[in-house]
Amino acid sequence: MSTTTPAATLRPAWSHDEGAARVRALFAATFGDPPDGVWSAPGRVNLIGEHTDYNGGLCLPIALPHRTFVALRARDDDTVRLVSAQEASSVVTLTLSSVAPGTVTGWAGYAAGVAWALQQDGFDVRGFDAAVDSCVPYGAGLSSSAALESAFAVALDAVHGLALASDDAGRARLAAACVRAENEIAGAPTGGLDQAASLRCQAGAALLLDCRDGSVEQVPFDLAGAGLALLVIDTKAEHSHATGGYGARRATCEDAAALLGVPLLRSVADAPDGGTGALATLADGTPEGDVRVRRVRHVLSEIGRVRQFVALLRSGAVDQVGPAMDASHASLRDDYEVSCQELDLAVSTARAAGALGARMTGGGFGGSAIALVRAGAQDAVVAAIAAAFAEAGLRAPELLLALPSGPAA
Ligand code: ADP
Ligand code: MG
């Protein structure tokens, strides 16, 4: 057993002042002169509703207290200069007019891509100098990429007076620009959940996002008031088939929708029979048919679990959502087949140590899990997970506490 204090292993979130001081210092050291300002955006964790976004379904993220900070100064020309405390290579310089799909490599694509997407939308966006620093875990399924894009989105919105960040409709447009930046310039597939969460979540609430029409509802989520805590376990596992597996799952869903003659599986979930007829149609006795049935069954049942989870929150039964979390994990593991040893271990250990519910979160094949725990049981769950990973000979996971936090600003 480790002798370290369990609470000491929780990854802290920076205060606004701490994050701002860091990026101001990096900006001054890199570019001289002060920036026009500092903006920041949160990572996110999805409470439930996994692999539903690209099917036009429902999901329920919260913004993390962990944020990415950007100090930015607008330029009069077309040059973009970027530096990040998380990227060892020094300043990246590029010309905004040369940004197009396939022209930018590495992390600069996320930042320059947002400026490009806003220009594509007709906004007058010019070059800039920017320094980035972040306490959002990298590549942990907690959306450091959307935090980065969203911080640039609100920064460019402010320095160019676009006024999009001032209401939810404008924030939805910023989120759409971030999605285009990630898909088309950074070249990473993403369904829209991450950017909506980073730009449209509100403190103290979970965001019920309808991915078919992009509409949102704020669902009060008072963890502390219910005496609960939400642990996020970054398993540090990243399996090589993560990207290919994601693409394959999307393709299977698209094939199934085409076979069923619907644009999105959401239409099937909303059918009066809840999709049982569709599942029977897909079960054609072939192995491929069997896979399709299981994939679609996950999507349909997961949309139902989002509704169930939201209904419990609305009725004040926050401490009753555990079974829906557990069922979501089982469905992702068995029907969607996107879990892995590390995620299963985090989830089973958390439950055995007293969690009310636990599930993998994010795309899967590694990344993070979440566990809902009574505040008093938090340290025991943290210690049990650390011990279980050590015993299994796995890399030590990193844990953090999620509280529903505010959006990009
Ligand atoms: P996740 O979004 O789950 O953290 P992704 O692979 O989608 O994982 O995004 C991680 C990538 O986003 C990094 O490899 C890097 O290119 C970029 N990125 C995220 N945060 C930063 C940052 N603070 N500075 C520079 N690049 C970043
Ligand atoms: Mg990402």
Image (cartoon, helix red, strand yellow):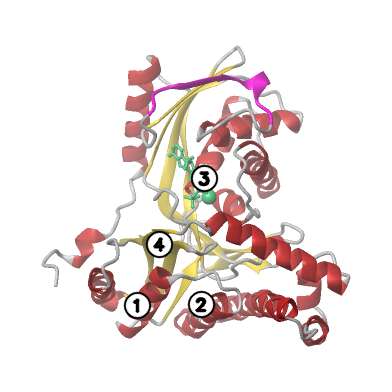
Residue assigned mark 2: 329
Q: Are marks 2 and 4 in contact (CB under 8 Å)?
A: no
* Element under disc 1: helix
Q: Earlier in the sequence, mark 1 or mark 4?
A: 1
Whether label 4 lies within 8 Å of ligand 1 gets the answer no
Give the label, 1 or 4, closer to the camera.
Answer: 1
Label 3 amino acid?
A: Ser
Per the model, the C-alpha gap separating discs 3 and 1 is: 27 Å
* Element under disc 2: helix
Whether label 3 lies within 8 Å of ligand 2 gets the answer yes
Q: Is residue 148 visible?
A: yes
Q: Are marks 2 and 1 in contact (CB under 8 Å)?
A: no
Label 4 amino acid?
A: Ala
Per the model, the C-alpha gap separating discs 4 and 3 is: 18 Å
Coordinates of residue 337 in the picture (x, y in percent) = 56, 73
Per the model, the C-alpha gap separating discs 2 and 1 is: 13 Å
Q: Residues within 10 Å of mark 2 (few under 14, many from 20)?
A: many
